Image (tube, rainbow, N blue to C red):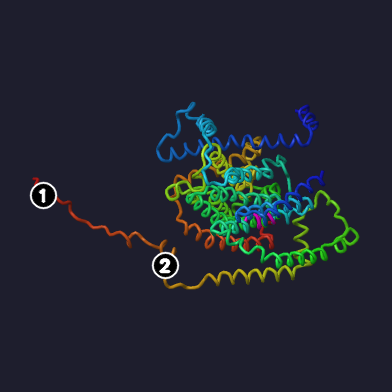
Amino acid sequence: MNMLSTFWTTVPITLQIVIQILAIVLPLSLAVAYLTLAERKVIGYIQARIGPNRVGPRGWLQPIADGIKLLMKEVIIPSGASRALFIIGPILSLAPALIAWAVIPFDNTLVLADINAGLLYIMAVTSMGVYGVIIAGWASNSKYAFLGAMRCAAQIVSYEIAMGFALVGVLLAAGSLNLGDIVRAQTGSLAHWFWLPLLPLFLIYFIAGVAETNRAPFDVAEGESEIVAGFHVEYSGMTFAVFFLAEYANMILVSALAALMFLGGWLSPFQGIPLLQGLFAWVPGIVWLLLKISVLLFLFLWFRATFPRYRYDQIMRLGWKVFIPITIVWLLAVGVAVLYKLPWWFD
Amino acid sequence: MEHIIFYIFSAILVLSALMVITVRNPVHAALFLVLAFFTSAALWLLLEAEFLALTLVLVYVGAVMVLFLFVVMMLDINLTVLREGFASYLPVGALIATLILIEMALVVGSKNFGLDSVAAPVPHAAGYSNTQALGNVLYTVYVYPFEIAGVILLVAIIGAITLTLRRRPQAKYQDPSQQVLVRREDRVRIIKMPSEKKRGKT
């Protein structure tokens, strides 16, 4: 172990960063692949089916088979499409989902870029994801794709405001934009985590996250029963796969952020409980974080299997007339609580 | 190293700004404007102004330009009509451009922004937080201008909302609260009746 760390310091800094990036992106890609399998399995069991079970033992190799299939398929660029933008679209939707992971802390010290404006960086980067969808919808030169892109743009801009206000609440409560400091501000016990004092903001953040990632029941941008498949109707093969990867990477990102900001990140849920705290002290923090992310991801899948798709005008009403007023009122409440150092959370 | 990065970003910024006004397709022009905003954010990051840089990306790239693209994509702009009379507008346009250039040279020239009037920025210490520094200045020294700007923006919001709130009698509205309040008894009537026997069979 000691030899390993001395060897690590001799590696040039650029190479160190590249290795760290790979150490984040490769497990993330694997997680995305197996999230697709988990989704099909979970929804299968919810609907009293078995789900994919043919490729490999219990269907465990299904994502790999899907990946190979999509790689081998021909990429068709429709005539009349804007060629360069048609290719740039999927790249622009995947890139923000990956670069946002630079500031995510996995542990007290385990973070690629420990910057002070981490929360702001996340907001800025995730707000760029919408370009991939808009550009793809426009460049396809297809009415369905264009309708999907327009729906997506309107929806994401509306829900980003509610999401931003929810994050402002977190930043007020923690007094810092650094994601590591936000988690450290929740130290104490399960009841110290921000989900309790910021409960409305937590719910709004997660629902807005579902809307931002275009997942059911807010998947009007795809809307397969209305506009075929929305913005990616003209995409095939690898370009389609990149859109798919971006959607699932975004789901994992939103879950990770919710876990960090509201559910105590890498902190153990047994903190402050006399007996259990010692019993589970050996568990590394990253395991708790991954567990919390998994629970939130399961919620994503559960939503998809449970709720019918929202009507478009109801989505807009929910975003503008319900979520934004609630966040503003709760921001005032949090502000007062922080000002008067409400005991238990903000003292 | 920092110089090389600065020149690369500046070159991209100038090129994309040029492309905004020269490309024929308005959607491409809007996308180049997005690139210009993004690169200027990168330049601000080099100046250690991370709050301003990230806010530029968040507000202009993430929201304003999305709505801009939204409108530009929806409008079917006929380019040939727009290009008519280019020669007749040229003298006026050139005059305005030169005037702006002269004004900018007077204000941003080396007399006001040279090294002798403004000291070269010194790299900040490791613990420096741009967000905190800005917040301190904004809520102490500049609190009145800040609050006044906020009030003006609020007035603008209210004005924009009232402009859209005109009543149109022929338009059909749905009242979601009424839709939510509907009960089963309002819509479904259960009738109890004995089962009927088919005629002709015994």
- CA separation, marks 1 and 2? 49 Å
Residue A119 in sight from this viewpoint: yes
Residue A345 in sight from this viewpoint: no
Q: Residue furthest right?
A: B116
Q: Residue at x 62, y 70 (%)?
A: B156
Total number of numbered discs in the rendering? 2
Q: Which residue is labeled 1 in the image?
A: B199
Depth check, front residue: B162 or A216: B162
Q: Chain of mark 1?
A: B
Q: Tell me which corner region of the image, top left, top right, bottom left or bottom right, holds residue B178.
A: bottom left
Residue B172's disc is 2
Depth check, front residue: A167 or A193: A167
Q: Chain of mark 2?
A: B
| Disc 1, SS | loop
Magenta region: which residues?
A: B56-62
Position in image of residue B101 (x %, y %): 78, 63
